[in-house]
Each structure stands twice: as structure tokens, then as C-alpha cells.
Amino acid sequence: MSMWTWLRSWPVLRQVAGDDPMGLGSAVKSERSDRLLPRTAEADRVVKSVCPYCAVGCGQNVYVRDEQVIQIEGDPDSPISRGRLCPKGSASLQLTTGSARRDKVLYRPAYGTDWEELDLDTAMNMVADRVLRTREQTWEQEHEGQRVARTLGIASLGGATLDNEENYLIKKLFTALGVIQVENQARVCHSSTVAGLGTSFGRGGATMFLQDLQNSDCIVIEGSNFAEAHPVGFQWVMEAKARGAVVIHVDPRFSRTSALADLHVPIRAGTDIAFLGAIINHVLTEEKYFRDYVLNYTNAATLVGEDFRDTEDLDGVFSGFSERDHTYDVTSWSYEGVEVAAAAGDRNQLHRTRKEEGQDIGHAGRPEQQGSGGAVIRDGGKEDRTLTDPRCVFQILKRHYARYTPELVEEVCGIPRDVFARVCDHLTENSGPDRTSAFCYAVGWTQHTVGSQYIRTASILQLLLGNIGRPGGGIQALRGHASIQGSSDVPTLFDLLPGYLPMPHAHEEQDLDGYVRAAGYPHKGFWSNMRSYTVSLLKAWWGEHATAENDFRFDHLPRLTRSHSTYDTVMAQIEGVCKGYFLMGENPAVGSANSRAQRFGMAELDWLVVRDFSLIESATWWKDGPEIESQEMRTEDIGTEVFFFPAAAHTEKSGTFTNTNRTLQWHDRAVVPSGDRRSDLWFMYHLGRLIRERLQGSQDPKDRPLLELTWDYPLEEGEEPSADAVLREINGHDAKGRPLSGYTELRDDGSTSCGCWIYCGVFKDGVNQSARKKPGGEQDWIAAEWAWSWPDNRRVLYNRASADPEGRPWSERKALVWWDEDSGRWSGYDVADFEPDKAPTYRPRDGAKGVEALSGVDPFIMQADGKGWLFAPAGLNDGPMPTHYEPQDTPFTNPLYGHQRNPTRLLYQHELNRYHPRPDTPEADVYPYVVTTYRLTEHFTAGGMSRWTPYLSELQPEFFCEVGPELAQERGLEHGGWATIVTARNAIEARVLVTDRMRPLRVQGRVVHQIGLPYHWGPNGYSTGDAANELMSMALDPNVHIQEVKALTADIRPGRRPRGPERVALVEEYRNRALITERTGTER
Amino acid sequence: MTADGQPSRKGFFTDTSVCIGCKACEVACKEWNMVPEDGLDFLASSFDNSGRLGADTWRHVAFIEQREPLGHQDAGVGRPEGGPGPVDVGMPSFELPGQRSAADGAGDFRWLMSSDVCKHCTSAACLDVCPTGAIFRTEFDTVVVQEDICNGCGYCVPACPYGVIDRREVDGRAWKCTLCYDRIGEGLEPACAKACPTDSIQFGDLDELRERADRRVRDLHGAGVSSARLYGEDPDDGVDGAGAFFLLLDEPEVYGLPPDPVVTTRDLPSMWRHAGTAALVLLAGAASAFVGRRS
């Protein structure tokens, strides 16, 4: 540096000599400021990724320098997120690189009082040994005389935060091991979505995609805290608003979603069916339905058998109810002269009915044998297109909802008639040929004992209004985990195989033919290809060993005999049946209902494997859980071995997340994880490898599924299996190994292999379609070249319905796909959800089968009759039409029926799981207030990815409850102070927020107060607090076994909860006062 | 760029009518600028647990719960229903608790959210009083503290009319929003504006932002949202206009903003002039005394 340069750098000289004599600008600019560059400019590379939090699936750019992630920002190319990120997405850098993440394997020996470090290799071998030991000890070859070939000794939970490829290996390996208790967050979050949407439309996914909301004229957000739980997705609601759409938020609380709505409608938690049912009644009686749509695209005209009886006739139950076991025989719900299979829901239901009736499976009136019945419906006069026949679905629906009036809404939901009328007006004025309305919901609807039916109610309403399959119309099921849609599609769920194929039951489904028949093989629609899907899956799993001669190794699949959902597993753990447990990114010790029962279950295990970022509550309960504090458990007495494996973050592995749009988005590995951190792909692959090595040479028949398993994936850096190779297997290939381009290419002769038929096409032309990143700004609003959606890259499902029966758009404004006469194909903005060259004029010949049997008008191609189901003749266990039942714990009686609550709900009568007294008893007043739970923007699920993250924790540092000023006054609660909330399960404490946003409702002539509890907390982490799930009971929807945590009752009192054994005593004192016994609350 | 090749003045327009209070701005700011987490304080102040702008909080989202018609907070301009409803003037109620249920008054409540930030004043007192040259005006007409120069004297802290700039406890230096000086120099958006899910925070050329904001206010007024007003955009206000201005739905005080901020160094020139005059007068007096004695 020359003397002059050096001198010139002296600010005083610059000030005197330059043009900044006051020294306020350039003269005082320091050398550092002069050289300042954004650190992103210094990155060696930018890796495309996807946010790991909720299921909006925001694009992320990961900046890497010197093999370290230095910044994570929104990817402006993403047409979904447009470069934006919420606080959680913005905190991804701290999540993935912060000091809260563990990087060493930890081990707690049985009866040990502290963690020990263990090297990764040893730990993996120990786990492999334990899996094989427990499997050997608990193997069940037969169950009640039927071959099941399984173990109930091992269970796995978690998958919604993981990649599809990881879920695939989890399901594949555990199934080959004979482990059937494989579950994930989808069970406790959105399982009812699959049953509700699936039975209505044929597929269990959201019918629309987030960006399509911008085309809506009216958006009803109900059962969702959209703005808080999916903030970046909410930009599309704001976009619609800016274009003039009306936004309505129906919710017990005034949340950040309500703040941006045009109308907030406070509702008593747990009464949405009464509310929506009354809108259905309004639409029907005021003739506001879209007649041409309803007539042609729904089953409104179809006649139902004369044995059917409605809840109106039987005081709250449908025909076929058994008082003995509280289940339905659904045969009387069938269409006139036809049995219909459900594409989703309980596909074995008809089979069970037949079995109970002692019918021979070979001769029973099976849907596949009456498949021509579908054609008979259309051709044989089993429809009444005037919609006047008293037995047609339309009239049945009308009668069913006749008593769901505005007055009833006021009485049940606490919503005044004029407010109800405003909602009806907005909705009906914004539906029809020229306008569309959308419903957005989330777990506020799913988590009820009638969860599936909540979604059914909205489905019926949207069908009547003609809002399905059309731009800006539809039902958006807002998913809350990065790949919870994916973990249902590639299911880590006990009752499903990939692509919603059912897990085989032990009854007559001992061979492939029996399975395909019993699962409800329909003659019409795409499900008629179920055998091709199944055989291709078996080929993917057992390769050359699966041949036509051996039934494609169908016997390698273990069999179900009953429900093995996560709550059944908890009970099995408490009973000592289930002895080994894998937790793959799920935290049931605070995240599942009745957390206390979860921990009691874990305390009975022989071994527990926890894979997570940090030491979550499910990993440390033996040391510092609430039962240790209350002295109900002693660490020294707990015989559970606990392994903690630190998990890799999304930036440290490649793979796909399936977002709430059903869109598979590939994310690339940015860096190799450090220490013992590994992906779940790595963990499952190497666990499988170790197990297979140990079994080499075994002649035991139960080991054949493992030894014959296709388990040969190329390894990349750090012995990481290639996620690309796994996704290729999921996509499938033909006999020559060429990638398939779509599920229509699948065959049932063993010539094709496909790990998940609905994902077939994701590797079309050998190209990873999920990794396509053509910027949204360079595409139209559909952005079809961004990633890949199932099925077949269609973004709006059932979009055939966006055109009229002749194939013309219902209106110019709402055009999406249409029949192009010149080219003889369906054309439009989106990929048609229809056979591309099937003309609107096509009519099936008599006796046509499979896809051919669907006419050119039928838009719901996965349904046996091609129709949207206003009435579900099969598929659901609790009724063909939604009916208002009170929640399990409720302060109010049901004014509609003698049967107060869902008579088929599942209950566990156990000391750890007591229910509250029925509302018409004096003891019910012990728990007088309604409680609901929800998410905050600043936290994520049970907190594992937010409570350890300082930037998020400081924004919502403590667990709190929200109460209205009236309740605060009534109970002496002090704003900012503490409150104790008590149920028959447990007692917790929370800071108090007294707010006008929680306001009392007037229901059945009296005032009811509601309490709001965000459920993110637990005792571990940086931000700590009690877990709301301590209060919950296990009371389940009978279709999908989801728990009711969105509406319950409790008492609230000022001050902190008692410590030690006093807490248990307090709960006991309440129970005694409420006279609670084993039978309390179990009335049907 | 302006005609003379200088970068044009950059700023923020924060449209609080579309803010969903998600606090992405707070986190994105901290992540980018590596601002320390500053404690778990449950403030019981609606959903605000950050409290105020400070050395470790460069974006702060305020939450205000009001018994006001919901329709005021409206992103759209095509609302089917008319203007605002009745305003609760806070008179005591004669009803029994719960008598008037929430649904009776559906829509008579609103929850305002607003992301506050350093205003990057045209006349910035912090800059005027900084004795070390640590604070400077950049080529984008933003006001930035240079962490390598600041010696922690703290003169700037009381000088700020908004109470924005603050000293960090651990190192004593002054810290505040830099409008992401490092990012905008490379043509990037500031971290908060980039993250904002609903585009409540908009970054750009100040002139263009002011036009956009005027249009937005006109649209909202046209839709019956009469309470919409701009704050800090006026070049004639006490700080000669802010580089970061806001669309508010209520009086500034409601959001914790000073209604009529004045640059605290406004009177410095005249004070110096007066001081100079005084000195001259003294000098003249002294001189005249000498002169007088001689005569």
C-alpha cells in the first residue's frame, strides 16, 4: 500500500478532501463496510431443497460454503411459495446447524440411571440383534387357526417428517420382518381425510392445489388455523381476497386466520356436522344446488335399497346397527340391487358382513360379481333422474338433513341465525357455473370421533354446489407435516400397502385372488386394475422370487386380524405384548393423545429406539418424565433399553416430500451429516442389511421374505443408499428394466414392477420428474413443470367435472379442461383426470368392465360408479351420511337423537384412560368447560423441531391457555398468571392469556366457555411447558382410529398445578367427585 | 438508479392490512444478520413476546386486540359488504357475562398486527450525533451502524425519536436494522421482505413504494376502510420522511409509534447559530469594553 493510499483511507482526510464534509456518508465508510458482501455471494454452491416443516412444501435454496450450510432462504422459483418462508422455514438454518442437535448415539441400559455413549456400529448391531430376538420370541404363525405370519412384538411410529423413500424402506423392511404395527403421524392427523375424501370422490387427497385458491370466489376455512399453521400457503387466500373473494373463518377461536377473514363465525368445538348439515339443508330446500352437476356427476339420482333406514327413523342409528358390538352391517345401505365397493375407507367391510352371514366367498353376492350392476344402475332404470323418488339419494339426503335448521345451528353450535344466513348466502352466491367456492380444513375437522364424517359433510356440500374438480373450487385438506401426504401414499400405516392397497386380512385372503376379491374388486373404474397394482408391488419387493406360480409371493405379506393402529399398540405395550418400539421422528410422549398412557406403554418395553434431532421427551421419560416426578415410576425399576440415534436433517439427504398439493418435490443433499447423524434411509437400509446377514443360510420359512427381499441399493458417500434408486423402484419398470411412464402400463402378469402405483410416472422417460424446477414465473398458474403430482401430474383432481356433460367448460371464467373435438382428446390447462381420448359421448356397452365401464360423463374415475358420493353405500363404518353426534366429552346433550354420541366410536376402558360423565348428569359439571387445541405459527407439532430452536422459542416462550374475560372472572384467573387445567386423565399448568378473542357462546340456553390450548409443549428443550395431550383421552373414530382432541371438556382453576404425587391426587380427587368408573362415558 | 448513476433511495413499505403476524420477518432478520436470541420472556401481551425493537430485535411485530369491526383489516378491495359497523367506545355493558355471545357480535372485533422496523429517517438524529463516524448514510440513503467503528458511546440511543437504536448488553455497541446493507448492495431483497409470506413488507425504490402505498390507501378507502392511513411517508414530517414507512389501520399510538416524531437534532443548527451569535455578542462586548476603556 502506497503512502498516499494509506493516507487517503484516513477518514478525516476523506472528510476534508472529499464531498462529504460533514462526515455522515462516504467519508466515514469503513473498510469493512466497503468490502461487505452477502455471505450467499461467497457460497460454493446453492442446493435446491424443500422446507422440512409443514406440508405447503416451500422451496428453499441452501447455500453451502466449505461443506457447511451458511444460509437457507426461500426459493423464488417455486410456484407454490414464490420465495417466501414463514418463521419456521426461516429458522431452518438454526434448526439444521444449531447446537441443539445431538451428534452422538446414546444408550440407556435396562434399569440404568443415565445415558452412555455408544459407537454407531455397535448400536446398529445391538438393534439388529434385538429385532431378531424379539421377533423370534413373539412370532405368531397362526392366529385363531388362520395363517398370519407376523409379530406383534415390534412396532414403529413416525414417517410424516421423512422422505417418501425412507417411508418406503420402513414399510418394506418391517413388512418383510412380519411387523404390522407400522404407523406414523398420518394416523393421528389426517387418516380421516383419506376415508372422508376417498369415499366421496375416490381418492384420499386434497382435490385442489394451494395456488388454485387464488381462483376462488369464496373460501371457507373451517377446522383449520390456515394463516398460522400454513402461513406461506395462506398467500393464495390473500391473493383471492385481493381479487375480491370472500373469506370466512369458522372456528371456536378468533385466531390470526380470523384476523384476515371477512367474517369470523365462532362455533362450539365439535359441532361442525350440525353447522354444515344445516347448510346442506338450506341448499336443498332453497334449491341452491347446481342441478346439472348434481344430476350428472353425483349419485343423487341413484336409488337405495328398500331396507335402508335413516337415523331419523331409528333415533340416531342407521339400519344394520348391532347393539352387541356397536358396529354396522352395511348391506342395507347398498344401492338398489347392487353392492358397491369403496375406493377408500374400510374396503373389507362388505367382506366382514358376508362372513358373519356365513356366506361362501366364492358365491356370495360380491361386488365384482355384480359389477354389471353398475351398468344396470344406469341402463336398467335404477336411477330416477327427476330426483323425486323417495328412495333416490337426493330425497334420502333431504330427509336426513331436514331437521338441521338455522334454529338447530343456534341451539347446538351457538351461531346466531343471521350469521348462519350470511355464510349460506356467501357460499351459494359464489357457487355455480360462473363461480366457485373452496373449503379448507385441517385437523380441526379430522381429530374427532366423527372425523371422517366431518369431511364427508363438506364433500356432500361441495358436490351439491358443483365445486369439485373446478378451478378455485374443491376441498383443500391442509396437511401439517412435510410429507404426511407421502407417508399415507407410501404408507407407514398398519392397514395399507403403497398406493392405498389394503393390507391383507387373515380371513379368506390367503391368496392373491381372494385378496383382490375381498378388498372389494369393482368392475368399474380404475380400481379394477387392483391386481396389476398388487402384483407389480410384489415384484418390486420380491423381484425374481415373485412368480405367477407362487402367487407372486403374496404369502410373504403378514396378515391383519384386527386394528393395529398406534393407540392399539399403546394398549399392547401396556399389556406387555409389544416389546420393541421404533420412533422415527415422532414424539408420542407429548404428541399423542393421553401422553401419560403413552409413557406407561413405553415403560413396559424391552427396548426402544428413538431417532430424532434432539433428546425429545419420548427419549428421556425414564429419567425425567412426569411419572418420575410424581413418583409413580422409579428410573431404577424401568427395564427398557433405550437407544438414541441422531437423525440427519433435510439438508443432509436427498429424497422427495409429498406436499399438501399431492406434489412430490425432490430435495438434494447439500452436505454430508456429521458425527453419528444419519438419514432414516441409511438407518433402515443398514438395519435390513445387518438382519439379512444374520439370517444368511436360514431355512426357517419365516425368514424367506427377508432373504428374498430386493435390498440392493447403490451406496453413495457415507454409505448412504441412493434415494434416486429407491424412487426409481417406487416408480417401477418393465421386464426389460425400462422406467414406466404411468400406472396404465402396469400389468398383472409379473412383467412390470412398481413400488407404489399412484407414484408411477414420477420417473417418466427415466427422468426424475419430481426434481423439475422450471421457475413458476416462466409457467402458467398450473405450473405443471414444477415437480410432479400424483396421479399422472394432475393438479386438480376430477377435473373432468370442470366441463359440462358434453365436454364444454361450464363457463369461460371457470374453464380448466374440455373436450377438443378436432383432436379427439381432452385438452386444457391441467392434465385431464380422465382417459385422454374418451369422448363425452362415450357410453359403455352392456357388460363392459373396468375402465371401459365408465361413461364419457363420469368424472370420478376411481369410484365404482364414476360418481361423487352424496350417499356412501359402502366404505364407512359409521354411516352413509354424516350425522351430528356430540363429542365423547361434552357438556351438552344431543337434541337430535337419543343416541348422543357416535355409537360406533372406539373406546379403551382402562384405568389410564377414563372418560367424563355424560352431560345430563350432575357429575358432568365437574368438567364444565369446552377445550380445543391448535397450532401456533411459531412452533411445530409436538415441538421437536421448534422448542429446541431459540429463534422460534423466544417468539412463544411458554405454554399458555387462552380464556375469555368472562371465564377468567368466573374462575379468578389472572392475566399473565398461571392456571391448572384438569381432566379425568391428567392435570397440567399453563400461563393465562385473557383475551376477547375467546368469547363465550350461548348454547341450549346457557353460556359455555371455551378454553384454547396450543399443543406444542413438553418438559424438554429450550422452551418448556406441560403438554396439552396429557389431558386427552383415547376415543377414536371407528373408520380410521383417529383420536378426538379437538373437542373435550375440562375444569380450569387459578394457580400452578401441584408437584409430585399431589398432581396425581388432584386428578383422583376430581375423578371421585365426578363418580367416574370404568363405564363412565361409554354409553352408546 | 437515478439519472446521475447513483443508486436510488431504497426503503420499506410495510402494509399492515395484510400482515398475518407470523413473525417470519423477525426470524429471517435474525438468521441473516446473526442477531442473538434475546431471552424467553412471556410478556402476556397478546402474541407479542419480543416486546419492542432493540439491539437484538430489528423487526418487531406488534399485536393489538381491539373491539373494532373486523372488516377494517382487509386485504381485498372488492368486499361485498359495505363500510365499517358500529365502533365500541368502551362504555360499560349492562349485559350479563356471556349474554351477548361471540357470534352476536361476529365481526366486531379485530386483531391488528404490524411489523415495525428502523425508519431510516431522511434526517437521522442517530447519525447526526454519532461522534465516531460509526453511523453513516449509505449510497442507498439508508442509515447503517458500522460494527467495526462503533465504540459503544451510546449517544445515538436517546437521539432516536422512535426508540429504535439500542446498545447490546454483551458488547455495548449500538445495533439496529441495516436494511440488509450487504444484501441490497448485491441486488438482493432484505431478508425480512423476502421471507414475508403475504408481502406485507415490501422493499424497493422509495419513490415507487410511495406511489404504491398511495394507491393502496385509495383502494382501501374506496372499499370502505376509512381508517387506512400512511405513517412516515411524508417528506415534510418531523424527520423529513422515513425510508421505512407504514400503512396503518389506526392511530400510530395504537401500534406504539410516536404520532409526531421529530428529529432530535432538528434544532442543532439554530442552537449552534444562537451559540455562535452569543459568542459573537460576548466577543463584541468584551471588545467594546477594551475599546471603551481606551477612549
Image (tube, coloured by chain):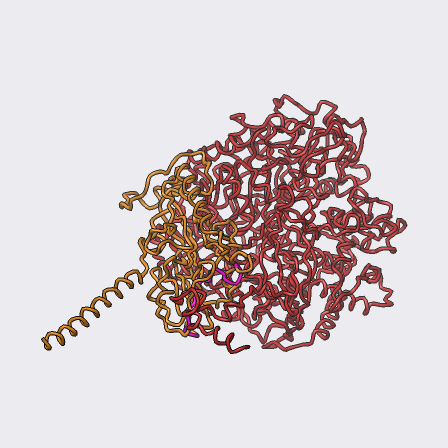
Chain colours: A red, B orange
- Between residues B37 and B208, which one lies in front from this camera angle? B208
Q: Quadrant of the N terminus of chain A?
A: bottom right
Residue at x-position 43% and y-position 74%: B170
- Between residues A190 and A414, which one lies in front from this camera angle? A190
Residue at x-position 87% and y-position 56%: A545
Q: Is residue B180 left or right of residue B154?
A: right
Residue A50: x and y in percent read 63, 56
Is A326 situated above or below A910?
Answer: above
Q: Is residue B280 left or right of residue A148?
A: left
Q: Residue furthest front?
A: B295
Residue A898: x and y in percent read 51, 38
Q: Residue furthest right?
A: A549
- Queried whether the magenta region covers residue A468, the answer comes back as no
Q: Is residue A586 visible?
A: yes
Q: Is residue A104 left or right of residue A249?
A: right
The picture quadrant where one finds residue A110 is bottom right
Q: Is residue A830 left or right of residue B26?
A: right
The picture quadrant where one finds residue A602 is bottom right
Q: Quadrant of the C terminus of chain A?
A: top right
Is A327 situated above or below A109?
Answer: above
Is A427 situated above or below A446?
Answer: above
Residue A134: x and y in percent read 73, 67
In the rendered structure, which segment of residues is drawn in magenta? Answer: B171-184
Q: Is residue A196 visible?
A: no
Residue A502: x and y in percent read 73, 48
- Between residues A657 and A488, which one lies in front from this camera angle? A657
